[in-house]
Amino acid sequence: MQNIRQTLTRFSAPILIAAFAISVQSCAEPADKFFATAILNTNTISDFGTPILAKHINDETVEFPDIPSSKKNGDEAGKLISNNILYMEKSLNDIKALNATSDDRKAIKEKSIALYEFVIPVYKNEYTNYAKLCDSKADQAQKDALANSIEQKYAAKFEKMYIDLMETGKAFADENKLNVDWK
C-alpha cells in the first residue's frame, strides 16, 4: 500500500503542477484585451496637464445668445470632471483586475496603475476646482492661473510616465503582433 501511494504521488504531482501552470496561464487575458485595458484606455487622459484640457473643461460652460439650446445649468464643467473621474476609477479597477502573467505584462500593469493613481487625485482636487471656476463664470485670469499651476506642477511628470508606458506598450504590441497605429 505504501508503494502504491508513493508511485501515485510521484506521477500525479508533476501532472498536477502542469495542470495548475496551464490553468494559470489560460486565465490571462488575450494580448489584445490586456493591451486595450492597460494601454488604450489611457488615451482618455492623454491631454492631462495641458491647455487643451483646460479649454475643453471651460468650453462646457460656453453659451451662445442666439442658440437657446446652448443655455447652461451652471454645473456642466463639474459634471464633465465627475464623469471623467468615474471613468478613470473604473479603468483603474479594470487594470488592477488584469492578470499579469509575464514580466512585460507586470511592468505595463504597474505603470498604468501608477499613471491613473497620479492623475485621479489631481482631477478630484485641482481640476474640480477649475471646473467650479468655469461653472461660476469666474474671471479668466483666475482660471488661467489655476490651469497654469496644474500644468507647472504635474505636466512634466505625467508626460514622462505616459511616454514610458507607451514605449513599454509598443514593445508589447510588437511582441504580440498587435496591429496598432501609433500616430
Image (cartoon, helix red, strand yellow):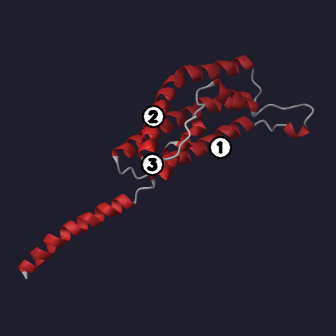
Q: Is residue 46 left or right of residue 136?
A: left
Q: Nearer the viewer, residue 129 or 80?
A: 80
- Judged from this view, the residue extending furthest toward the bottom is 1
Does the CB distance between marks 1 and 3 fall below 8 Å? Answer: no
The CA span between labels 3 and 2 is 20 Å
Q: Residue at x 48, y 37 (%)?
A: 117
Q: Sequence order check: which comes first, mark 2 or mark 1?
A: 1
Whole-percent x and y of residue 145? 65, 18
Looking at the image, residue 69 lies above or below residue 139: below
Q: Nearer the viewer, residue 146 or 69?
A: 69
- Describe the element under mark 2 as helix, strand or loop: helix
Amino acid type assigned to the residue bearing label 3 in the image = Lys
- Give residue 83's mark: 1
Q: Sequence order check: which comes first, mark 1 or mark 3?
A: 1
- Residue under label 3: 96
Q: Residue at x 76, y 29 (%)?
A: 136
Amino acid type assigned to the residue bearing label 2 in the image = Glu
Looking at the image, residue 62 lies above or below residue 17: above
Whole-percent x and y of residue 20? 29, 64
Mark nearest the camera among 1 and 3 is 3
- Residue under label 2: 167
State the quadrant of the N terminus.
bottom left
- Describe the element under mark 3 as helix, strand or loop: helix
Whole-percent x and y of residue 57? 70, 32
The CA span between labels 2 and 1 is 28 Å
Q: Is residue 104 left or right of residue 17?
A: right
Q: Sequence order check: which comes first, mark 3 or mark 2?
A: 3
Q: Nearer the viewer, residue 145 or 97?
A: 97
Whole-percent x and y of residue 34? 47, 50
